[in-house]
Image (spheres, coloured by chain):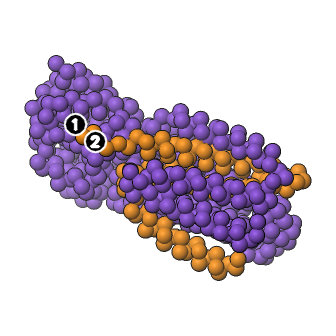
Amino acid sequence: MTFISELSIFTLAIFVGYYVVWSVTPALHTPLMAVTNAISSVIIVGALLAAAPGYWGAAKLLGLLAVALASVNIFGGFAVTRRMLAMYKKKEKKA
Amino acid sequence: MSDSVTALAYLISGTLFILALRGLSSPESSRRGNTFGMVGMLIAIITTLLLTGIASLPEIGVAIAIGGGIGYIVAQRIAMTAMPQLVAAFHSLVGLAAVLVGVAAYLDPAAFGIGTVGDIHAVSRIEMVLGIAIGAITFSGSVIAFAKLNGNMSGAPIMLPARHVINLGLLAGIVVLVGIFYITQNPAAFWVIVGLSFLIGFLLIIPIGGADMPVVVSMLNSYSGWAAAAMGFTLHNTAMIITGALVGSSGAILSYIMCKAMNRSFISVIAGGFGADASAGSSGPKIDRPYKAGSAEDAAFIMKNAESVIIVPGYGMAVAQAQHSLREMGDLLKKEGVSVKYAIHPVAGRMPGHMNVLLAEANVPYDEVFELEDINSDFGQCDVAYVIGANDVTNPSAKTDKTSPIYGMPVLDVEKAKTVLFIKRSMGGAGYAGVENELFFRDNTMMLLADAKKMTENIVKALGH
């Protein structure tokens, strides 16, 4: 992919992010932070590439460490978001 | 897999991430949104593994299992009151992971398809170094934010002399070194950039006080996104670029909302030092002024006979872990036929939405919880405002006193309620902004001087009979 087409995707994604995030209800801003945290760990893709080669070296070790760190975030981030979202309940009808 | 299938898979995962955020527009759709996010992540990981990683699957599996296990256990055990620290800690991990990936790319460019050792593609050099620099700033900044939020470090601003000069100097140094690295690929320049970036992240956050943490946490959230995006450019990966842009703009919007809720400019927050000087501001003669104090029984009696009560929680409620007894109190009042609502200021607590999560944890239905703009006009018709652990966000001088450091900040109009019940540990000690609250001395204010949780529990007891 050329740099310009990547830049186009990036620019458009910023606008998508802008509109999507403004529509998030303020009550869910904490889960928003937790889930953005989890998805920004998509950086694991880079970590996997670094960890993939069949030969061992500093780059591979750093990659594996990054895989582990990003995994903390992915599992932790999604799990804690799920836990929080499960707590948001509506008023019971009888009350 | 062919290149186009791979690219398509990453695009799908990027789209699922957009849907994950879109789901958060209402609590009902949010849970499905979270599932979209998980599926998106799974697709991204599997695609990458199929692409290159099959041979190294065992060690990668171990790394994922260790990290994932730790993350999952922490997420299950963490107390909701500790959410700001947890988020700061997670940000630091994203930052560190970005640095590690960037350094790995530098050491083994062939694995990333961006050139060979000592001869990395020109554009990739810039993207890679930028990703590392932003990642390092995110990491060290988040570590400081974590330490401040977790109480390992005082929340008070730490002011170095000439800190603006130092920071700007460091920043300029990094920019120059990026230029040098771009032209010469000098390894020394590379490593110095890494070191300086860690240092500047640290220096940027130490002068920022506890009350400004909602902005800092949002800002670091944004940085972690930009770091991911820069790495996405380095690796030509659509999923990373899209996600980075989403997270980056999300954090930026949250920072903006938080700054606006404090009527402060982003620059003044970043410059730091707010809340350092407790004597600053316009507070008139202190302490000696008369105020009314009451007991739990008094408060219970007043609220029992009220028609409507609005509860205003703040960071103090989180510290005292009073949310559960607060909900109990609300339930008892509702049984007495009192209408109970909750009013939340955008910067109540230590991160955006902090109070909402705590109330949700205590089983307060979210349709009883209102944001500042939606409820502020209700205080005029309400009998009792119950302020628990909030201070600056209720200070009427923000509306009237032009010399006050918090002048112009939108506040909850609690003083318009017939009676204000204000829970505070003692009369000494101002809010985080270091400003005396005019509200304490009003005729319609009754101070309940005690720990927020104990006082609420005692009111619950008093309401019980």
Would you name the residue on which mark 2 appears? A91
Q: Amino acid at mark 2?
A: Lys
Of all chains in the rendering, the one displayed in purple is B
Q: Secondary structure at mark 2?
A: loop
Tell which subunit mark 1 falls on. Answer: A
Q: Nearer the viewer, residue B372 or B172?
A: B372
Query: Taking B457 as reference, is B14 left or right?
Result: right
**How many other residues sit within 10 Å of disc 1, few (<14), some (14-19) or many (≥20)?**
few
Residue B208 percent coordinates (x, y)? 48, 51
Name the spot of residue B376 as percent of width and height, x first. Answer: 21, 53
Q: Are marks 1 and 2 in contact (CB under 8 Å)?
A: yes
Residue B10 located left or right of residue B295: right
In the rendered image, the vertical position of residue B441 relative to residue B186, given as above or below: above
Which element is circle 1 on? loop
What is the display colour for chain A? orange
**Residue B419 in sight:** no
Q: Where is mark 1, residue-wise?
A: A95
User: Label 1 is placed on what type of residue?
Assistant: Ala
